[in-house]
Image (cartoon, rainbow, N blue to C red):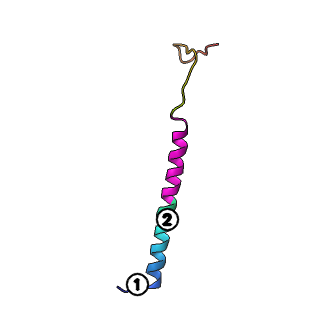
Amino acid sequence: MHFSLQNVFFLVVVALGFGLFSWQASRIRANILIGRDREVRGRFSKDPGKRSS
């Protein structure tokens, strides 16, 4: 198959773009999952506007 230099350059840029996107998506997912298993303790008021002391 015959590929010109422009086609090869385009494929490299697209591959780098997908790689960068997947890397950023995995970082965002990891940051979201940081607070997932947090245990919350304390006394909570039934009225959401009130603060318990």
The residue tagged 2 is: 17
**Going by the picture, which residue comes out furthest to the right?**
53
Q: Amino acid at mark 1?
A: Phe
Disc 2 crowd, CA 10 A, few/some/many (<14, 14-19, 20+)? few
Contact flag, marks 1 and 2 (Cβ < 8 Å): no
Residue in view at x 58 percent, y 17 percent? 42
Residue 32 lies, with reference to residue 12, above or below; the image says: above
Outermost residue toward the left in this view: 1
**Which quarter shows the N terminus?**
bottom left
**Which element carries disc 1, helix, strand or loop?**
loop
Instruction: State the image coordinates of residue 23 (x, y, percent, origin top left).
Output: 52, 56
Within 10 Å of disc 1 (Cα), the crowding (few <14, some 14-19, many 20+) is few
In the rendered image, residue 34 lying in the magenta stretch gets the answer yes
Q: Secondary structure at mark 2?
A: helix
Q: Name the residue at 49% across, 65% down.
A: 17
Q: Is residue 50 above or below residue 20?
A: above
Q: Residue at x 57, y 17 (%)?
A: 49
Q: Which mark is residue 3?
A: 1
Find the distance from the CA under tag 1 to the CA under tag 2: 20 Å
Disc nearer the start of the sequence (1/2): 1
- Between residue 27 and residue 46, name the one nearer to us: 27
Q: Position of residue 21 (x, y in %)?
A: 49, 58
Camera-nearest residue between 39 and 48: 39
Q: Magenta region, mostly helix, strand or loop?
A: helix
Q: What is the quadrant of the C terminus in the image?
A: top right
- Amino acid under label 2? Gly
Left or right of 18: which side holds 40? right
Q: Which residues are magenta?
A: 21-36
Location of residue 43 by image quarter = top right
| x then y, percent, for residue 13 | 49, 71
